[in-house]
């Protein structure tokens, strides 16, 4: 898909602030610092739209991006940041649970992981959490430019196995640095828009 327009339409703290239109929606989840903002910016061809390395744990909001007037990306605050209190972590979990269970137009969650390392415990927990709610997952294994091409398939295999990825879910190798995987990510998203 060629992105011709994109903008943040709302930072929502509660459900009555979620956009009213029933446009197809894709949420983006990942641990803090994994490269989620960079992924969003690359996909939207926008340099500073999603803030790169904004202070983790601070934003407990869901940021809705309207793209080409036909779909939404929803940026979920990063998880796994050690300095977040138990109370904040619980509030984050409740917000996410409310969103996932109430949002009918949610087509899939893009789970961003780091291709260089096996998915963390938190990544596995997030994947299982999404499967519990029967939400399709598109795994984005990013930072591919940081490892040699010859090792990509080995790392992809480890990622799939660690998550125990279901055959119905998709995994895409990605790099926000080179744009590797961008076209594939858009074509998978476009296919899910029709679901
Ligand atoms: P977020 O906290 O998940 O939103 O992560 P950011 O997008 O802020 O990225 C964290 C750091 O990783 C930043 O220094 C980025 O420049 C870097 N980064 C993100 N994606 C990539 C990538 O695909 N390749 C490389 N080499 N660096 C990346």
Image (cartoon, grey):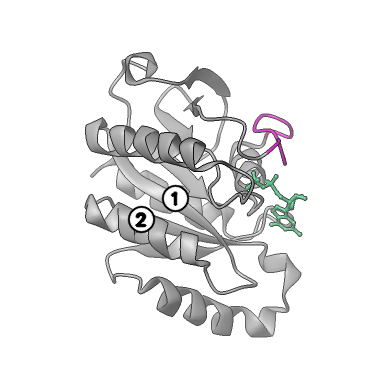
Q: CA distance from mark 1 to mark 2?
A: 6 Å
* Upstream in sequence: badge 1 or badge 2: 1
User: In terms of depth relative to the viewer, which is nearer, 17 or 7?
Assistant: 17
Helix, strand or loop status at disc 2: strand
Q: Residue furthest front?
A: 86
60 drawn magenta: no
The residue depicted at 47 percent of the width and 61 percent of the height is: 123
Question: Residue 191: x and y, percent?
Answer: 33, 49
Question: Residue 89: x and y, percent?
Answer: 48, 41
User: In terms of depth relative to the viewer, which is nearer, 43 or 3?
Assistant: 43
Residue 78 makes an appearance in the image: yes
Tag of residue 90: none
Residue 25 makes an appearance in the image: no
Helix, strand or loop status at disc 1: strand
Rendered-image quadrant of the C terminus: top left
Q: Is residue 162 left or right of residue 7?
A: left
Secondary structure character of the magenta stretch overall: loop
Q: Which residue is mark 1?
A: 110
Q: Is residue 40 left or right of residue 172?
A: right
**Vertical comparison of 169 with 149: above or below:** above
**Vertical comparison of 55 with 111: above or below:** above
Mark 1 C-beta closer than 8 Å to ligand 1: no
User: In terms of depth relative to the viewer, which is nearer, 73 or 124?
Assistant: 124
Q: Which residue is mark 2?
A: 137
Q: Which residues are magenta?
A: 46-55
54 drawn magenta: yes
Q: How many marks?
A: 2
The residue depicted at 61 percent of the width and 47 percent of the height is: 39
Q: Are the residues at dot 1 and dot 2 in contact (C-beta closer than 8 Å)?
A: yes
């Amino acid at each position: 898909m060629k992105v011709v327009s994109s903008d943040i339409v709302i930072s929502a703290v509660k459900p009555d602030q979620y956009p009213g239109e029933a446009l197809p929606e894709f949420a983006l989840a990942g641990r803090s610092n994994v490269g989620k903002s960079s992924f969003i910016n690359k996909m939207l061809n926008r340099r500073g739209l999603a803030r790169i390395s904004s202070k983790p744990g601070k934003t407990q909001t869901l940021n809705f991006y309207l793209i080409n007037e036909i779909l939404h990306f929803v940026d979920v605050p990063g998880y796994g940041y050690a300095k977040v209190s138990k109370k904040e972590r619980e509030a984050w979990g409740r917000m996410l649970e409310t969103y996932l269970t109430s949002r009918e137009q949610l087509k899939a969650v893009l789970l961003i992981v780091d291709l260089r390392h096996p998915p963390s415990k938190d990544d596995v927990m997030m994947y299982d959490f999404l499967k519990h709610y029967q939400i399709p997952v598109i795994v984005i294994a990013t930072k591919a430019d940081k490892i040699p091409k010859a090792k990509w398939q080995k790392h992809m295999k480890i990622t799939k196995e660690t998550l125990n990825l279901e055959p119905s879910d998709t995994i895409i190798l990605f790099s926000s640095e080179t744009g590797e995987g961008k076209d594939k990510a858009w074509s998978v998203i476009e296919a899910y828009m029709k679901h």
